[in-house]
Image (cartoon, rainbow, N blue to C red):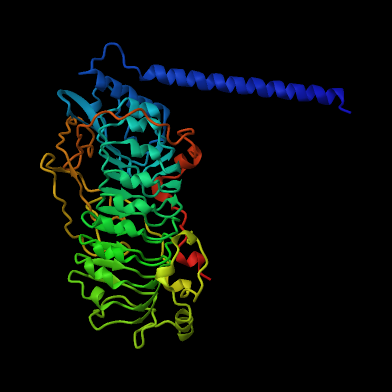
Amino acid sequence: MELPGSRARSVATTTAMFFAATLLLLIISAASASASASVEPPASWSFPNARLRAAYVALQTWKQTAIFSDPRNLTGGWSGPDVCSYFGVFCAALPSDPSLTVVAGVDLNHADLAGFLPDELFLGLPDLALFHLNSNRFCGTLPRALAGLALLHELDLSNNRFVGAFPGVVLDLPALRYLDLRFNEFEGPIPAGLFDRPLDAIFLNSNRLRRPIPANLGDSPASVVVLAHNRLGGCIPPSIGRMADTLNEIVLLDDGLAACVPPEVGLLRRLTVFDVSFNLLQGPLPSALSGAADLEQLDVAHNRLTGAVPEAVCALPRLENFTYAYNFFTSRPPACPPAMDGRFNCIPGQPSPRPPGQCAAAAAHPFDCTKSDCSRHHYPYPVPFPPAPPAHEWRRGYIPPPAPVGGPTRGNLRRPPPPAANSHTTPPAFPATTPPPPSSAYQPGHRMPLPPYHPTPSPSSPAGSSPPPGSPTAPSYQTPPPPKGHDGGLPFAGCHSRRLSAFPMRLRRRRPFPTTESFLP
């Protein structure tokens, strides 16, 4: 039986909680109304056109309501009607109407900002051709309004804290050619529609993506595909052979891939980098790889490959770096230079061989690639034979996230050789090049062609705010259909303002992703 005093206290507590919640809602509403009112420019200000006025409102809304932390005060100068002079904001003539100057690029790489991306930002900046936020502390999901950017050519959100399913909203961007979502927390499957888009560069490494690579990988016209350090499992789709005329570099490092290396890789006559190390690939290395005559960097280390190292592969004319260490190869032809890394195999007379017991166990369990069923292989899956070498011999250390400095390197993506030129033919109508994407331990060299673009930052811009050479460009495309409602949920889901504002970006270390060692017996 409840005592009268206890009941009275319960009612009082409930009433107090109700009034506290009501007061909190009123405070939030008042703050939102105040912020909305404050972003409207004074009536005395004049703007060259309505688009620049809308850009002012969008940028002020972002600054005042969705940026939690700006330790370097880079947005402190975002005031006044001249939005083209704001740090990291670049303007250009609208392609469809050169008489109009619009905000065409936002580049806040390495700014150490924390916050999220509100819909209002992209609703007020519909003419963006470039949006770069590499190496910040933004979180949450990508807003649906992003799909309204009909001219967006480059999207770089790498090294942040974005979460949720793969942002399907990027599939609605008709002009997108460069997509960089590395070092975030996206999860779930990679949509098959990604490889139907006319993207030239796809960087998705170091997320939480799961499920096998879609079978239509070969439909992509991309020249660079980097999916390393995810949780994909499955096989390398044989359709990869259809990328013969376009694919230059593909990196599938540490993705839990199983079964065999498809011989269709040998059809990739333009391929220069092929890295499938730290997986669970089995069977022989196909001699058909000799068809990839331009191959320079080949890394199949830390797998379960068996048989002989193909002589035709060692004889590739441009091969500079061939790493096949930590497998179960039984012989190596004389054509393989000694400098090529073949440690810890079953090759007699080679330095650092595997223990005989491991080699015997591997020989007793041959893998028949003709009977492989990719549908059985999901990450992680049990490995049937010998254990990995001691962890201290090959555990991969922390590799820092990308940083927007200089030109990227290419080749062995853990110990890159000196940079080499990697040029792409520029379309006749668009004779300009983009600034190089941020370099990282996983990113091969890449420059992609872009249409002509002429940013006009004000001379009063802060030091360092001028765009890099060959600034973003804005191709002319028709406005896409309304957003389809991708990526539901609050835009700031997953944001923890205390954690984000208390710890600078440079002090954050990402949690280690599981490598092959994690699921070897």
The x, y position of residue 314, in whole percent, is 24, 75
The x, y position of residue 382, in whole percent, is 52, 67
* Of 52 and 367, the residue lying toward us: 367
* Of 113 and 228, the residue lying toward us: 228
- Choose top left, top right, bottom left or bottom right for residue 478: top left
The x, y position of residue 122, in whole percent, is 34, 29
Examine the rendering and report whether any part of residue 72 can be seen.
Answer: no
Is residue 403 positioned above or below 472 on the image?
below
Examine the rendering and report whether any part of residue 237 can be seen.
Answer: yes
Q: With 19 as the anchor, is 206 left or right in this view?
A: left
Is residue 429 positioned above or below 41 on the image?
below
Q: With 46 as the anchor, is 168 left or right in this view?
A: right
- Choose top left, top right, bottom left or bottom right for residue 102: top left
Q: With 463 as the anchor, is 497 left or right in this view?
A: right
Q: Residue at x 16, y 38 (%)?
A: 451
The x, y position of residue 205, in whole percent, is 37, 53
In the rendered view of the protein, which quadrant contains the N terminus? top right
- Choose top left, top right, bottom left or bottom right for residue 99: top left
Check the image and name the residue furthest to the front.
371
Q: Residue at x 26, y 55 (%)?
A: 243
* Of 273 and 382, the residue lying toward us: 382
